[in-house]
Amino acid sequence: MSQMISAELVDLALDLAADSKEAAARVLAQRMVALGRVSDLDGFLADVAAREAQMPTGLDGGIGIPHCRSAHVTEPTLAFGRSATGIDFGAPDGPADLIFLIAAPAGADDAHLSILSALARRLMDESFTSALRAATTADEAAALIRGDQNAPAPDPDPAPDPHPDPTPDRPLRIVAVTSCPTGIAHTYMAAESLTRAGQAEGVEIAVETQGSAGFTRLDAAVIAAADGVIFAHDVPVRDKERFAGKPTVDVGVKAGVNRPAELIAEVRDKAARGEITEAGARPSPVEAGGEAGEGYGTKLRKWLMSGVSYMVPFVAAGGLLIALGFAVGGYKVSEAPSVMNHFLWTDSMSWAALLFQVGQIAFAFLVPVLAGYIAYGMADRPGLVPGFVGGAIALDIKAGFLGGLAAGLIAGAVVMAIQKVRIPAPLRGIMPVVVIPLVSSAIVGFLMFLVIGEPIAKLQSALTSWLGGLGGANAITLGVILGLMMCFDLGGPLNKVAYAFAVGGLSDNATSADGSFKVMAAVMAAGMVPPLAMALATTVRGRLFTPAERENGKAAWVLGASFVTEGAIPFAAADPLRVIPSAMAGGAVTGALSMAFGCTLRAPHGGVFVVPLIGHAFLYLLAIAAGTAVSAGLVVLLKGLRGAGPEREGAPGDPAEPKVAVAA
């Protein structure tokens, strides 16, 4: 800790220079830049803002902990600021007066992360925070944080237990797991908060912190002896099945920080009622992230997105390798013999064939992975085997992408049905290893081969033929529809449906030029428009955007060029009624123009970096530029109509520009 903070990184009058969380982060980050701890101020602040957009970093007790891992950080650094008026970091109990900016390098080692976690735990100590509020000099505050100067000892007499344990022979035993998206602060603060609450309640509690520095699993004997479990997490709990059969409370990580006593009380009540979570009845990975009372339509969407999310890396790897093979060796590379039998080290055609054949193998996993992880989203690990089997059958009978969707849903449904059957206790041990894979695979195979496989294969063939014959007004209309879908939810379900539709056609026609390649081109072009448009808008009319949005705009240039539609999400979240319609308009224009120009694309990802693989590349870039201009123009117009931008005069980084009053 001694190397992480010094007096130069402390500001005890932060309110004099900052009145918002963005301004506070900038002021503290500037101190890091001055000491050479941060190499790019704007890039680092963009990473801080991106982390803040995931979840507010304010905590009860007047604490704000903006933090991130960033490539612009040269060494782990901590800056501290104190504000007399308070700065809003989204905490339930109001503004924060103690602000800690934690900067971790992208490749921070375990030791540094452990030191940062130690600070996070100390923040839960009231005597430590009280001493920081009373510090009169920057040197004194830095010494407290480093641990050079001890805070006053807390009251040794804890309050009496308001919920005495009903078991006289031993206290309640709880195991807990905490985790957060970055694994730096909230993970360890929740662990410390739960531990302190357990001590106050007379409860034995053991916490497993699944942070960025890795994690040490709780001893199996400790889990077996526990009376209940608390999951306080914002990312999936690893090896969650270890805790099956215990009374369980499952909440977000901030609940572990803010209300640990309530969570312990809830576990106590569940244990007293004998309410347990059966291994076969655990929520699936996708269902666990849903809200209570969700309809099946919402769950279906999440199941499908589970499959698509796992499929995309195979799509990108296989599709790009195939496209590179075509780029190096031409279209005849698809007819080349196996490189196992014919490969010349000095022959470019041999290298092209190698790229193409590796890409084909990677692409062949697309449908099985899609089906397998749809089933996984529905039924957890038992769904993987029948899902993959059903997906492989879909490929074998040429049912393609649609067959994979059907196979995944059927496999998940079959496993869920089997899990509801009451099984004698002696047989439960072999259910997930033998019985469920055997029975579910047999049922899925029967249905795919003999019942639904042929109709789906015919539908897939008809769809492929239709795409191949697209032209004129039909193609332009499809381009408009795909463009609207890609830009409506900016990486959400509709966006993924349009993308999956394009990839499905590409996978079925990887060796022949037809309408499928036009669809892929239109989808990628439209998906690039929203972040590029927001980047352009923040460049030409920065006054209409907040400092954080202007910083996000810089990153959006790269995200848009790389076909990462999600780069526009921060803008849409802040102003959806203006940003989303503008993005959709530009996406529709780009999709229509791409189809009208007859642009083709064999690679399913890559953005501008695969321009050499695009048919009619100049017209393709023109279509993207036109859509970007339309979206940027509309969002600037709509934001301008509401009056002057959100910035106050004199805000950091704002050019001197008079405010313009707009008549009501």
Image: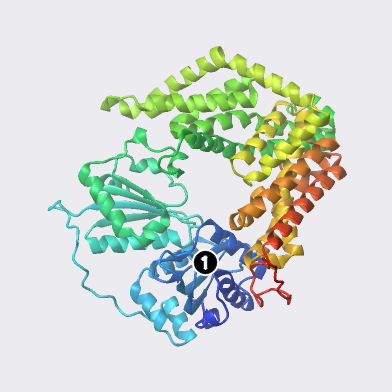
Residue 587 percent location from the top left of the image: 73, 45
Residue 70 percent location from the top left of the image: 60, 62
Left or right, 351 with respect to 548, comes to right
Mark 1 neighbour density, 10 Å: few (under 14) some (14–19) many (20 or more): many
In the foreground, 643 or 254: 643
Quadrant containing the C terminus is bottom right
In the foreground, 10 or 576: 576
Which residue corresponds to the image point at 64% horizontal and 47% vertical from the top-left?
A: 490
Residue 188 percent location from the top left of the image: 41, 61
Outermost residue toward the top? Answer: 450
Q: Quadrant of residue 158?
A: bottom left
Q: Mark 1 sits on what residue? A: 66
Which residue corresponds to the image point at 46% horizontal and 52% vertical from the top-left?
A: 234
Residue 231 drawn above or below residue 388? below
Residue 81 drawn above or below residue 89? below
Which colouring convention does the figure follow? rainbow
In the foreground, 657 or 168: 657
Q: Quadrant of residue 632?
A: bottom right
Residue 339 percent location from the top left of the image: 75, 29
Kind of residue sitting beneath label 1: Pro
The reply to whether residue 124 is in sight is: yes
